[in-house]
Amino acid sequence: MKDLVKHVLSSLRWRWADQRGAAMMIAAGSMVALVSAIALAVDVGMLTVARTESQQVADGAALAGAGALILSPDNIAFATAEAINFSSRNDIRGSTAVVLPQDVTVDVNLDRVTVRVVRTQARGNPVGTFFARIFGVNAVNLVTDATAQASPAGGINCPLPIALPDRWLEGPGSDPRSFEPQDGDSYVPWMNTSTDPVTYNDNYTGYSSADVGTQITLKSNTANGDMQPFWYYPWRPPNQAGADDYRTNVRSCVDPTAEYSVNQSVAVEPGNMAGPTMQGFRDLMDLDPHATWNSQMNCITDASEALSTNASYCRSSPRVRPIPLFDPRYGPETAAETFKFTNFAGIFVEEIKGKDVIARWIGYTALRPAAPGTTSTTPFKVLQLVE
């Protein structure tokens, strides 16, 4: 019996002294902790992406709403609808963003629109988690907001030295390729500068935020025939002349301090400027040869990210330029020596095909206001995020 007890005690002492397998137990415990940390990191990363996407929706919807106040001042319903419409075209973590009327605040006195994007338990649309469910956290609430304002601009700097006819409403029997008032085509400007104070037209026939990203083809005007939608007409900035100045104004501008505003009269550029126009646009393309239009996000990215849906790749480009618009009823096509600007818009110069320039309509947010402290005789406005 003593020998048996002695043998058992000896065996136990040997097993207690043997530490083989301890490292495996420590490693197993560490793996559990490491996997838990990685799992939480995945959820944190996912929630960070969701917040970024939600903020982008809020920013864009607020800009869309404020843009509506440019087209139709004091129109709260229109600004609200534009903000909601923009948000519905975007996703947050694969689900369509939902902005309700109560999430949009319109201040017509300041021309401001605030949009709140809400993903909460109370709304029934919180952001779901993955691994955090292990700890009982199945979803989290997410709320982002943004405020955009349509701010008065002192004027427009460095517009292209070509002008386009503003959009008109086609008559029922009219040729859509030309402006034919005799066949029912009509044009309503966005504002009446002949009144004091200036008044605005809710039935403006021109472009809107819904046209952002639309591809347009700029063609040189011809001496004969009716005016067509995207024929461009050269004009001459004051105190400038010649093909060299004209080409420079296409590429950048001769005088970056000069301002241009709605209702301003300018002189028609005489002569055939088709050659200098194309040379200037080629120079402009060379300033940023890798820029491209990303149709997934309606923004400019590098060509390598043309199909990306990552908004962080969106960027600016010198190929974004303001372009003046004119009333098609009183434009240079009528052989007048001068004509007036009725509006401005931004375009992205996408490519050149033969004698045509392919561009993207990017609305009114591409315009740069004049230097701080300057004033303008017309209340042209540009968009900016303020909060």
Image: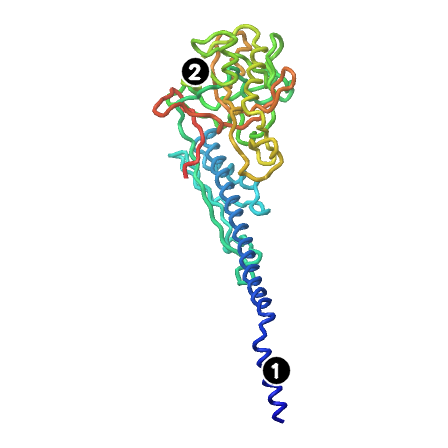
Give the quadrant of the N terminus: bottom right
Q: Residue at x 58, y 70 (%)?
A: 22
Q: What is the quadrant of residue 157 in the picture?
A: top left
Badge 2 amino acid: Asp
When asked about the image quadrant of residue 86, the answer is top right
Residue 277 picture location, percent across and down: 56, 13
Q: Position of residue 250 (x, y in %)?
A: 52, 16
Residue 82 higher or lower than 360, as above or below: below
Q: Residue lying furthest bottom in this view?
A: 1
Which residue corresponds to mark 2?
255
Q: Is residue 255 visible?
A: yes
Q: Residue placed at 62% from the left, 8% from the top?
A: 224
Is 123 left or right of 151, judged from the image as shown? Answer: right
Q: Residue 380: percent from the left, percent from the top?
A: 43, 24
Of the two numbered discs 2 and 1 on the same chain, state the one appearing first in sequence.
Answer: 1
Residue 205 in view, yes or no: no
Q: Secondary structure at mark 2?
A: loop
* Numbered label attached to residue 11: 1
| Mark 2 residue crowding within 10 angstroms, few (<14) / some (14–19) / many (20+) | some
Residue sitting nearer the eye, 185 or 320: 320
Q: Residue furthest left?
A: 373
**Residue 148 image point, x, y percent:** 44, 36
Measured along the vertical axis of the image, is residue 53 above or below residue 254? below
Looking at numbered disc 1 in the image, what kind of residue is underneath it?
Ser
Q: Do labels 2 and 1 touch, CB within 8 Å?
A: no
Looking at the rendered structure, the secondary structure element under dot 1 is helix
Residue occupying image coordinates x 48% and y 21%: 343
Tell me the CA gap for discs 2 and 1.
97 Å
